[in-house]
Image (cartoon, rainbow, N blue to C red):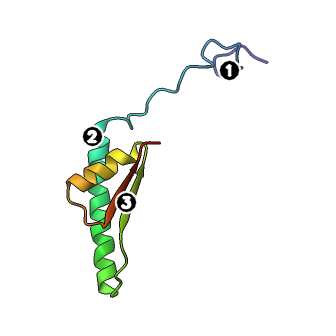
Amino acid sequence: MSTDDTLPRSGTHPKAFEPAPAAGVFDGSNAWIGGSFLSKDIDTLAAVQESLGNTARNNISGLSYGTLTAQAAAVEGVAVDSVNLHAG
């Protein structure tokens, strides 16, 4: 087996236990952008439901980073019956 950096072996490679670099998803601005999209999607869903005479309840459940997105949508006034946040 090669000792090349691209082939890490657990316990023997110097970078074997380094976490992957963040891809920018942990930036809070992404939660606000996602919350805006979520709010628009929920509004569209509500319009479709109304046009069909559907009286279903709409709920948002956010897990881990999704809690920030759900909170951002809630701050925008997303029209749902409940928002559940799970820190996970």
Is there a contact, CB below 8 Å, between mark 1 and mark 3? no
Secondary structure of the residue carrying numbered label 1: loop
Q: What is the quadrant of residue 53 in the picture?
A: bottom left
Tell me the residue that label 1 is attached to. Answer: 8
Around disc 1, counting alpha carbons within 10 Å, would you say few (fewer than 14), some (14 to 19), or many (20 or more)?
A: some
| Identity of the residue drawn at 35% across and 69% down | 58
- Residue 29, label in figure: 2
Amino acid type of the residue that numbered disc 2 sits on in the rendered structure: Ser
Amino acid type of the residue that numbered disc 1 sits on in the rendered structure: Pro
Whole-Å distance between the Cαs marked 1 and 3? 40 Å
Tell me the residue that label 3 is attached to. Answer: 60
Q: What is the quadrant of residue 51 in the picture?
A: bottom left
Quarter of the image where the N terminus is located: top right
Q: Is residue 76 left or right of 42 when viewed as pictured?
A: left
- Along the viewing direction, whichever of 7 and 41 lies nearer the viewer: 41
Amino acid type of the residue that numbered disc 3 sits on in the rendered structure: Ile
Up/down of 68 relative to 40, above or below: above
Q: Is residue 25 left or right of 81 when viewed as pictured?
A: right
Q: Earlier in the sequence, mark 1 or mark 3?
A: 1
| Identity of the residue drawn at 29% across and 52% down | 35
Q: Earlier in the sequence, mark 3 or mark 2?
A: 2
Around disc 3, counting alpha carbons within 10 Å, would you say few (fewer than 14), some (14 to 19), or many (20 or more)?
A: many
Residue 56 place in picture, x, y as percent: 37, 78
Secondary structure of the residue carrying numbered label 3: strand
| Identity of the residue drawn at 67% across and 14% down | 13
Residue 45 place in picture, x, y as percent: 33, 72
Secondary structure of the residue carrying numbered label 2: helix
Q: Earlier in the sequence, mark 2 or mark 1?
A: 1
* Of the two numbered discs 1 and 3 in the rendering, the one whose residue sits closer to the viewer: 3
